[in-house]
């Protein structure tokens, strides 16, 4: 008679843990993808990392005719000059001022336009408005600044409209007074890029679940309540990511529009870091000073990008890194 043992379970063999795939095996399985990425990797290394070697010029009194070993090393001499030069501090103020204004207006106008376009029900009218708002993006800054200068002339359309509305008594010379220059640059950027900037927001809005809008209709929500409680929260991650990327370019106020619209009367308000580098660095053969200005912009951009990403992480928002 067999003995029955109570309270025991039949022995089951232990499952062997799956061995992790070796790196070499993974490489062989994905070799097609690796081969496809080689040209892109070579492009990035050639044009993004190899030129970083040129940063050594910022720490030298660089002379083009001399070899690398014959250059005179001066340490942080050119950086000290930047931060003690009144002209550089002035262009830094201009760059930050115009960049912040462009950032705020660019975000606000693009989001508002995307919300309004989303509320248009007639497809033909919606596409017409989109097309009209996109077109200025494809114009070069040469053409845009020509249009702006003509419109803001003493006999231009802007002064004509303001005088007919009795808002001003005589024409205003917009491009000869520094106090108007930042506003002119910001308006030019908005007019040129607002339609193009709405594309990403419209794509984000299209990904929102339509059931949310149907439920809000049942609850009796109007259009403005839907915008505030459904659409804006739905595109919030996209807004945060784009904001982080834009903060990383806080010193990229522009070059073309300031250079083309600027003149001797508004030079104290129109010069940016890029124009400073061109005017006092490259044009005068002081390549070390020009490189130091470029390094300063890069370091500030990376620092602001990391800070914005860290702040988003602490606030529980979407992050870029």
Image (spheres, helix red, strand yellow):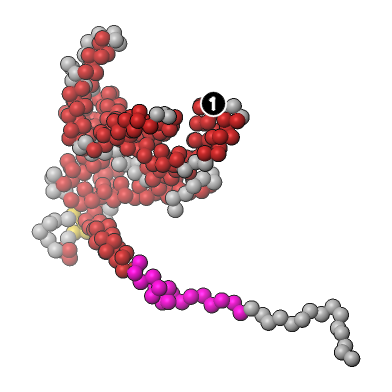
Question: Mark 1: which secondary structure?
Answer: loop
Q: Residue lying furthest left in this view? A: 65
Q: On the rendered structure, is 137 left or right of 124? A: left
Give the residue displayed 43% in from the left and 45% down from the top: 241
- In the image, 132 versus 160, the foreground residue is 132
Circle count: 1
Q: Is residue 237 magenta?
A: no
Q: Quadrant of residue 64?
A: bottom left
Extent of the magenta region: 16-33
- Residue 244 to residue 183: above or below: below
Q: Could you tell me if residue 120 is visible in this image?
A: yes
| Quadrant in which the N terminus is drawn | bottom right
Give the residue displayed 34% in from the left and 69% down from the top: 32
Find residue 211 and report its horizontal and vertical position in percent. Answer: 55, 39
Q: On the rendered structure, is 200 left or right of 19? A: left
Q: Quadrant of residue 273?
A: top left
Q: On the rendered structure, is 3 left or right of 61? A: right
Find residue 30 and report its horizontal and vertical position in percent. Answer: 39, 70
Find residue 124 and report its horizontal and vertical position in percent. Answer: 35, 30
Label 1: how many residues lie within 10 Å, few (<14), some (14-19) or many (20+)?
A: few
Give the residue displayed 37% in from the left and 37% down from the top: 198
Q: Could you tell me if residue 108 is visible in this image?
A: no
Label 1 sits on residue: 222
- Residue 321 to residue 239: above or below: below
């Amino acid at each position: 008679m067999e003995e029955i043992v109570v309270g025991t379970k039949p022995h089951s063999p232990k499952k062997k843990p799956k061995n992790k795939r070796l790196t070499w095996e993974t490489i062989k399985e994905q070799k097609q993808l690796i081969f496809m990425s080689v040209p892109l990797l070579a492009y990035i290394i050639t044009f993004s990392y190899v030129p970083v070697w040129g940063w050594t010029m910022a720490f030298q009194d660089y002379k083009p005719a001399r070899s690398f070993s014959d250059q005179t090393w001066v340490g942080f001499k050119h950086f000290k000059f930047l931060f003690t030069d009144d002209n550089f501090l002035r262009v830094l103020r201009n760059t930050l001022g115009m960049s912040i204004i462009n950032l705020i207006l660019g975000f606000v106008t693009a989001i508002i336009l995307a919300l309004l376009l989303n509320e248009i029900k007639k497809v033909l009218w919606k596409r017409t408005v989109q097309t009209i708002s996109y077109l200025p993006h494809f114009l070069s800054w040469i053409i845009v600044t020509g249009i702006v200068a003509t419109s803001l002339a003493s006999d231009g359309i802007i002064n004509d409209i303001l005088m007919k509305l009795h808002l001003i008594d005589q024409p205003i010379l917009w491009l000869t007074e520094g106090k108007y220059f930042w506003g002119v640059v910001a308006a030019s950027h908005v007019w040129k890029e607002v339609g193009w900037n709405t594309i990403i927001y419209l794509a984000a809005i299209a990904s929102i679940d339509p059931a949310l809008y149907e439920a809000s209709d049942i609850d009796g929500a109007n259009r403005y309540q839907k915008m505030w409680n459904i659409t804006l929260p739905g595109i919030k991650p996209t807004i945060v990511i784009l904001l982080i990327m834009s903060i990383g370019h806080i010193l990229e106020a522009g070059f073309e529009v300031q250079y083309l619209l600027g003149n001797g009367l508004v030079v104290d308000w129109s010069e940016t870091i890029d124009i400073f580098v061109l005017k006092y660095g490259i044009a005068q053969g002081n390549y070390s000073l020009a490189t130091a200005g470029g390094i300063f912009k890069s370091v500030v951009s990376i620092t602001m990008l990391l800070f914005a990403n860290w702040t988003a992480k602490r606030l529980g928002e979407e992050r870029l890194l």
